[in-house]
Amino acid sequence: MAESVSVRCPTCRREHTYAPPSYPCSCGAPVSLPLLSGGVPVQVQHRTWAGSWVPVRCGSCGKLDEWPQPEFGCVCGAIVRVPVASPGPPPTAAAEPTGPTAPHGGRGSGGGPARPAAPRGPADRTPDGSGSGSGTGRGSEPPRATREAAAARPSPARPTGPPARRPAFRPVTIRTAQDAKTAAAQYLRWLGFTEVRIAGNRPASGVDLRGPEVVAHVDPTTTPTTLRDIETLWLNGLNESATAVCFSLAGYSHDARNRADELALPLFVLDLTGTPQPVNDPADALIRTVA
């Protein structure tokens, strides 16, 4: 396992202990992402699929592949990208790997898998929530009835499902919008919501995942999830007496994060490996209910 390092969030200046992930090379050896010594972490404002991958050379066979950029979600809501050192020259005696084709976790620079296509998302979505559709708008005060309902709403319900002890979560690598839904659904099932179903086509309600006690929105776009998405999801959960959970690939706008905290709505961010990370206290509370 790669050695942990101390990383400071560029937004709130909190210190985090971060261990870069490792991926399996086609030769079978683990490839650890080498963090750049003295590199400055940056906040991911607008994610692009071409810029979400980094070339890393396998130290065992010398093959150069591309893997997901190392990122993590800070408790302040920011998505922090940790810089990686540039790959060095291949070893002079590097042997050509004879193993199977590179696994789906990486993009081969030569004969490996092709670069994933960017997932399609709603065209009218903007980071400040100014897209078409209903909603209270950016920075508006929630109606009194909404505030009272939020105050009366119980904390996230304990999902029905397997016992507290769970096996290790198996993520789903994200290449498409459907992969993001699959990864989020698998995570909810892992938490205990065993009957979660994925909506075939995006419904007008914005609910992508649904179960007897949970509704979830999965935002696979490259812009932060908006305030309108959070409020719409919360209302769906309130109407169905279900726990509402949101997953986002690019994080959340500031007002969306604040409103989610007010409404006790759990927020998670997805990295390209398909591993959700909690970004607010309600998300941590949801995990603890079955921990």
Image: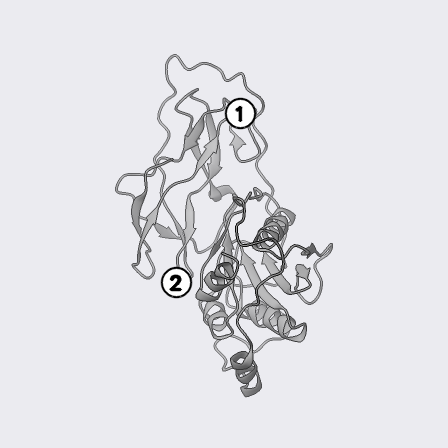
Residue at 56% in and 55% down: 191
Residue 110: image tag:
1
Residue 92: image tag:
none
Q: Amino acid at mark 1?
A: Gly
Alpha carbon separation for disc pair 2 and 1 = 39 Å
Can residue 224 be seen here? The reply is no
User: Is the residue under label 1 in contact with that under label 2 (CB below 8 Å)?
Assistant: no
Residue 134 drawn above or below residue 267: below
Indicate the quadrant where residue 122 lies. Answer: bottom right
Q: Position of residue 120 (x, y in %)?
A: 63, 51
Q: What secondary structure is found at the residue carrying circle 1? A: loop
Residue at 48% in and 60% down: 288
Read off the residue under disc 2: 76
Q: How is the image coloured?
A: one colour
Q: Position of residue 269 (x, y in %)?
A: 50, 55
**Depth check, front residue: 220 or 172:** 172
Q: Amino acid at mark 2?
A: Cys
Residue at the right extreme, as displayed: 200
* Label 2 or label 1, whichever comes before in sequence order: 2
